[in-house]
Amino acid sequence: MKIKVNNIAQLYAEVDLATNAGKVIKLSPGIYKLDATMGQNSGRLELQKDMTLKGVKGFPDLVIIDASKLPDTSFNPPLSIPAKRTGAIRMGRGFNKLEWIKVIGNGNASPLSVIDTDLVLGTTTRIRIANTIITGGRIGINIRNVGPTCDGRFIKAELINNEITGNLVSDAGTQQGQGIVMQNANGASNAVIKATLKKNYVHGNIRGMRVFNNNGNQAIQQLNSSIVIKSQADKFEENQTGINLDGGSNGDTGGTLNDNLVIFDAYGTTIQNNRGIVQDPITLPCGIRLVAGSKGPNGSDVSNNKVIMKLTDCNVSGNQDFDIRAYGAFSNNATVAGTKNIVEIHLHGISNSATVLPDDSFPAEPAGTNIVKILH
């Protein structure tokens, strides 16, 4: 069933109504300015189970959801569940879809994302974001399992034919200006994200896409989580860094982060002309940065984490310094990050022309258990 809305008051009323679960909210052309004094969620839009938001087919810029005037407090979910900050539009209940809409984020430093998948209802959710334009945020699309609430949670995500650009908001930390983020974080063990990306244009962000398993600077345990991505004919261009893939990243804590996995399998995708975060000694200029296991200056060791990247007939070229930088292990202090962290890079077809700078371990590990493998 479709429910047509014509103004912001109707939009809040229909999205907030629990009996509209499973329905399509069809937005008429116009600008819908989110307002902290309206709706049930401090101005956020929180989709009901199996709910869809849909604009005008073929014309995503005719329907604009504008979150630019929401105050910082609008991005603090009740009781900080599942985490302290969230997005202007929240998805994650059943099968939520967002199609043919332009969404503008908030330029302040406090909001986490424009769109987030952190509404938890059961152990499985499906997300589809298609034919949208997403801009103006710290994170454009944040697909995440976060915290012990998401232990064992499975997200199946589809990102199809979106333009994700101009996400440049930065707090001078690790969350700056990311077009797409996929993460299992803050103790979400045995969590799984499987994502299909097709014909997305990700450009003009600080980081085009960041994918990671991370304990989020908390002294907790996170084990056996995975993120698997299939990319077809996507474009990651003119970002500062195109793609970051981190198998297991431990912050400045005594937490445990072992046995996590990231797989990125791309066909005909372009990672081109990404100009590098020049002043960031950790990221370094490149098109793609891969790290199987890493830790912060005061972090605990990470072990048995893995990143597998397969590029088939992908145009990986013109990126600053190197197209690909890869580390089996990377530490932000003088001690080795951990053991048995492995990166595998598979290059096929025209992808073979990419320039690669591999480093098994930084700093060096005498035992040689951290490895970067390059396969043709």
Image (cartoon, grey):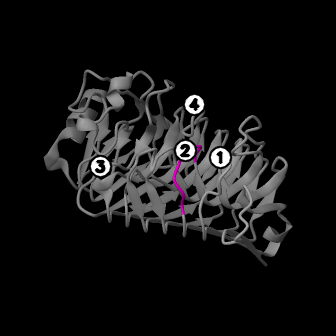
Alpha carbon distance from label 2 to label 4: 23 Å
Does residue 164 appear to the left or right of 214 in the view shown? right
- The amino acid on which the numbered mark 4 sits, given as a three-letter code, is Ser
Alpha-carbon span between mark 3 and mark 2:
32 Å
Residue under pointer 1? 333
Where does the magenta region start and end?
A: 296-302
Relative depth, front residue between 59 and 184: 184
The crowd level at tag 3 (other Cα within 10 Å; few <14, some 14-19, many 20+) is: many
Characterize the local packing of mark 2: few (<14), some (14-19) or many (20 or more) Cα atoms within 10 angstroms.
some
Tell me the distance, in whole angstroms, between the alpha carbons under discs 1 and 2.
8 Å
Classify residue 365 as left or right of residue 74: right
Give the residue number, with chain letter if any, for mark 4: 170
Which of the marked residues, 4 or 1, is nearer the chain's N terminus?
A: 4
- Give residue 205's position: percent from left, percent from top: 64, 39
Question: Which residue is under mark 3?
Answer: 119
- Using the image, determine if residue 167 lies above or below residue 309: above
> What is the C-alpha distance between the residues marked 3 and 4?
24 Å
Quadrant hosting residue 203: top right
Q: In the rendered view, does 67 fall on the left or right side of 229? A: left
Q: What residue sits 38% from the left and 52% below the top? A: 220
Q: Is residue 50 above or below residue 107?
A: below
Which of disc 4 and disc 3 is earlier in sequence? Answer: 3
Secondary element at tag 2: loop
Give the amino acid at mark 1: Asn
Q: Distance from label 4 to label 1 (Cα)?
A: 24 Å
Q: Secondary structure at mark 4?
A: loop
Tell me, for residue 298, which label it has, or none.
Answer: 2
Q: Is residue 265 visible?
A: no
Question: Which quadrant holds the C terminus?
Answer: bottom right
C-alpha distance separating marks 1 and 3: 36 Å
Mark closer to the observer (3, 4): 4
